[in-house]
Image (tube, helix red, strand yellow):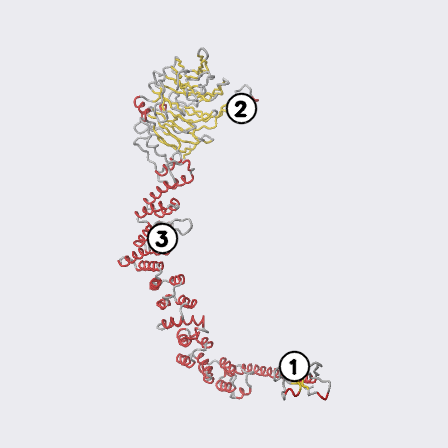
């Protein structure tokens, strides 16, 4: 046997049990709920004892030890319409027809009664000679054509039916031992004897076979009743001692009929069989599972019987089963009862189970959705309860809603100090209901855990979301001020200022700051001050906010200034901004000229380094306009803080005083810068002397002389360097094309050792030869070009100029060509094709219309 849990579940519903409890380390969710039937039934059982039961959807019938039959509704109220015939001793079995119109009962006194529920018209009474253990009424007894049949069992099985004039009793079968139970469903009757189980086809009047009980020394038939229950017309449930069997009554297929035509049309097949570790008092179906009423085999420490148990099991092929739930039932007086004192009956359509002991009747029914939720809540399994209520059909829920269960879950989490989980659950449960939110807020406030709830509070920032009362948000902020300054800062940044009263929160922060609590760390106070600055921003008190952030050295001030586009206070905090982050500050100052340089420079003059950083950035961005005004300051600042950029600045700058710059460089002995400045003011000899004597850089000296192209400067350089062998070698190699080599070679003293002289001379001669070759080539080209151009000019001057007959003088507008030679004047024609009378030009030798320097062409 397999169980769903290693622990037994607790006792059933408190209505069923007494004060005793069974400990369990882990409770599993029950399948059934229990309720004790009280009212009139309880009053009767106080005087009498129940010996049998039969249930119908309309009512239930209880047989007592004193032989009485009692009819009740399912709540235990008496519904007896008239007195039923009573037995003189214990009622052994009761059977009800399908419509609930007639009730059959039998007793040890040998009498069998058929009582009508509404009338006694079809009532019957028979008196047998022996003890009648069982009776079964025809399910169709209510029909007029049914024959009013019923079956009794003692040492034999008899069927009794009512004819037109009399009653007829027919022997159905000689029992194999005494019959102790009969169940009739449809056309099939099943009965159990001390030998085994037999199923009988009442229509075909034939037995479908005998299933014999296994022989066991502990299984005495007189001690254990066989329990039968028809799940439907073809499924029979059987329990006896500690054995459970499930049979299927089916029609034989054509192949089976053809094999042996003498066999009945129906056959009984066993589909499940398993053994239990407890005795069986009853069996009933629950959907695809079985419900077993069990009686423990072991006695307690005092030798008394233990509680009966109701099991829900799932049979498995192969002789095993899974135990789904087990409930211990605390029935009155259970210590004195034996296995046969308990009965189990069932309403299959309603899945309701009636457990009967001599002094108690208990109804078990499956847990509905509300029951499951209630059990899960009572056992603090709120996650499962939430899942059930979320997935359940709303029509199935009568006592619980998602909000109710959610409230209980939130209260539970708060009681267990699981504040974050409770806060997250609020989002799922409360939705967009403002009233519910505000109720839960006060719960968290009582626990002083509004901080846990704050990230999940609705803020109305998106369409369809709600806003809470401003007082709610203020409560949250007050709690943060007292307990968590960093959290307060973050919340102030996130929470829209329109949700709460700004002046009230600012005053609360100020009061807290003025208290000056010694236990608060400096970091915590800074966080509170930063939050106060953010609040000032929300109030549009930008100057206060920015000044406070700068004092706190908060780099976010730059982004906030840009965000709010407030630049009026920059001059007041310019130095602090530069000290906080110079690159961001200068970028802010220079952004779209929000602050003019002429206003910033005086503020920064007291701190030269900060002034340098600002002017350097200004020079990089705007050196040709606004930056020019401050180039005189930059010379000394570059000399002090960025010497490597000074020379570049001196080269491209043109608004600084050269003499002052030269003095600054002379004080610091910045020779490259001094060379450049001396060169700019024309003191090339002094500059060359610095290059040769201080820098000792022959390459720079050569480049300097080549840049200025001064013969005297070349001679000065050669004079200063030729006596140095390493310099002389470089000069021989590099200056062959710049100066006359003879001038250099003649000044080298005889006997002077010059490293690499041969290589240098070869290079010099090659360069000189190349120069001479280039000059010769250029000369040849020049001469050729001269003669070609001269020839072209002569050709142009000798070329005729066409003068048309209608040509007019450009001055007097008279024809230039006349037919009478005696009246003609001299004619002058220029290359531009303009023509003039000679006398009209008045001595000019250039075209009056075109350029006056144009040369004329005489015809």
Which circle, 2 or 3, is nearer the viewer?
A: 3
Tell me the quarter of the image containing the N terminus: top left
User: Between disc 2 and disc 1, whose residue precedes?
Assistant: 2
Q: Nearer the viewer, residue 801 or 530?
A: 801
Q: Which residue is mark 1?
A: 832
The residue at which mark 3 appears reads as 499
Marks 3/1: CA–CA distance = 89 Å
Q: Residue farthest to the top?
A: 165
Answer whether residue 726 is visible to the viewer in this image. no
Badge 2: few (under 14), some or many (20 or more) residues near its Cα, within 10 Å?
A: some
Which x, y percent locates residue 378? 34, 38
- Give the image location of residue 344, x and y in percent: 39, 25
- Of 38 and 796, which appears nearest the observer? 796
Residues under labels 2 and 3: Cα distance?
80 Å
* Residue underneath mark 2: 252
Instruction: From the viewer's perspective, tell me whether residue 143 is left or right of residue 379.
Output: right
Crowding at mark 1 (Cα within 10 Å: few <14, some 14-19, many 20+): some
Q: Which element is circle 2 on? A: loop
Quick check: 685 left or right of 796? left
- Residue 573 showing in the rendered view: yes
Q: CA distance from mark 2 to mark 1?
A: 134 Å
């Amino acid at each position: 046997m397999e169980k769903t849990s290693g622990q037994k579940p607790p006792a059933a519903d408190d209505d069923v049990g007494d004060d005793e409890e069974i400990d369990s380390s882990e409770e599993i969710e029950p399948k059934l709920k229990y309720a004790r039937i009280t009212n009139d039934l309880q009053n009767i059982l106080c005087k009498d004892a129940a010996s049998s039961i039969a249930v119908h959807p309309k009512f239930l019938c209880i047989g007592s030890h004193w032989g009485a039959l009692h009819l009740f509704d399912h709540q235990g109220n008496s519904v007896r319409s008239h007195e039923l015939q009573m037995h003189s001793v214990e009622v052994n079995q009761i059977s009800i027809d399908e419509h609930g119109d007639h009730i059959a009962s039998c007793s040890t006194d040998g009498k069998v009664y058929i009582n009508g529920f509404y009338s006694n018209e079809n009532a019957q009474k028979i008196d047998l000679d022996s003890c009648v253990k069982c009776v079964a009424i025809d399910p169709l007894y209510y029909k007029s054509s049914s024959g009013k049949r019923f079956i009794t069992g003692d040492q034999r099985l008899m069927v009794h039916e009512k004819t037109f004039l009399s009653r007829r009793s027919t022997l159905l079968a000689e029992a194999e031992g005494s019959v102790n139970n009969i169940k009739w469903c449809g056309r099939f009757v099943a009965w159990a004897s001390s030998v085994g189980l037999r199923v009988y086809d009442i229509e075909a009047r034939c037995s479908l076979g005998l299933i014999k009980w296994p022989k066991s020394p502990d299984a005495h038939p007189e001690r254990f009743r066989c329990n039968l229950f028809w799940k439907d017309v073809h499924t029979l449930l059987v329990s006896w001692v500690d054995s459970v069997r499930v049979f299927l009554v089916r029609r034989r297929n054509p192949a089976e009929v053809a094999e042996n035509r003498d066999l009945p049309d129906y056959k009984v097949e066993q589909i499940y069989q398993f053994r239990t570790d407890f005795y069986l008092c009853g069996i009933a179906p629950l959907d695809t599972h079985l419900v077993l009423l069990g009686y423990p085999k072991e006695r307690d420490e005092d030798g008394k019987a233990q509680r009966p148990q109701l099991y829900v099991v799932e049979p498995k092929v192969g002789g095993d089963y899974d135990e789904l739930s087990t409930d211990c039932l605390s029935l009155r007086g259970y210590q004195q009862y034996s296995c046969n004192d308990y009965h189990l009956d069932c309403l299959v359509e309603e899945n309701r189970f009636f457990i009967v002991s001599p002094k108690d009747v208990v109804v078990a029914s499956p847990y509905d959705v509300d029951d499951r939720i209630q059990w899960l809540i009572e056992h603090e399994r709120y996650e499962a309860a939430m899942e059930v209520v979320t997935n359940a059909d709303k029509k199935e829920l009568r006592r619980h809603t998602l909000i109710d269960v959610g409230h209980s879950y939130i209260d539970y989490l708060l009681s267990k100090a699981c504040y974050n989980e409770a806060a997250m659950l609020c989002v799922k449960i409360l939705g967009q209901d403002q009233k519910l939110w505000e109720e839960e807020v006060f719960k968290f406030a009582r626990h002083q855990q509004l901080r846990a709830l704050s990230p999940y509070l609705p803020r109305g920032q998106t369409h369809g979301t709600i806003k809470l009362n401003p007082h709610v948000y203020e409560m949250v902020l007050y709690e943060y001020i007292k307990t968590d300054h960093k959290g307060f800062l973050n919340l102030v940044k996130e929470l829209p200022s329109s949700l709460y009263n700004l002046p009230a929160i600012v005053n609360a922060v100020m009061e807290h700051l003025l208290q000056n609590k010694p236990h608060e760390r400096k970091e915590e106070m800074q966080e509170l001050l930063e939050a106060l600055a953010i609040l000032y921003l929300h109030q549009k008190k930008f100057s206060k906010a920015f000044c406070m952030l700068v004092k706190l050295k908060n780099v976010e001030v730059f982004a906030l200034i840009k965000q709010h586009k407030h630049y009026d206070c920059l001059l007041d905090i310019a130095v602090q901004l530069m000290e906080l982050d110079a690159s961001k500050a200068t970028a802010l100052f220079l952004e779209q000229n929000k602050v003019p340089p002429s206003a910033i420079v005086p503020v920064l003059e007291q701190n030269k380094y900060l002034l340098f950083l600002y002017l350097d950035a200004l020079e990089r961005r705007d050196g040709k306009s606004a930056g020019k005004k401050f180039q005189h300051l930059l010379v000394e600042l570059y000399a002090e803080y960025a010497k490597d950029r000074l020379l570049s600045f001196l080269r491209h700058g043109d608004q600084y005083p050269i003499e002052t710059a030269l003095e600054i460089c002379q004080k610091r002995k910045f020779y490259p810068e001094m060379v450049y400045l001396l060169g700019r003011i024309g003191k090339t000899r002094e500059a060359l002397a610095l290059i040769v004597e201080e820098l000792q850089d022959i390459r720079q000296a050569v480049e300097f002389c080549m840049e200025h192209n001064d013969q005297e400067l070349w001679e000065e350089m050669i004079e200063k360097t030729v006596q140095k062998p390493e310099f002389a070698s470089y000069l021989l190699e590099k200056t062959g094309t710049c100066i006359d080599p003879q001038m250099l070679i003649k000044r080298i003293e005889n006997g002077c050792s010059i490293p690499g002289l041969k290589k240098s001379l070869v290079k010099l001669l090659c360069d000189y030869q190349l120069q001479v070759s280039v000059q010769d080539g250029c000369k040849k080209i020049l001469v050729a070009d001269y003669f070609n151009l001269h020839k072209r000019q002569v050709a142009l001057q000798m070329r005729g100029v066409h003068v048309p007959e209608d040509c007019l003088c450009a001055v007097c507008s008279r024809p230039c060509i006349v037919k009478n030679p005696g009246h003609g004047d001299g004619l002058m024609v220029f290359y531009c094709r303009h023509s003039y009378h000679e006398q009209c030009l008045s001595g000019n030798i250039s075209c009056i219309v075109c350029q006056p320097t144009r040369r004329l062409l005489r015809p």
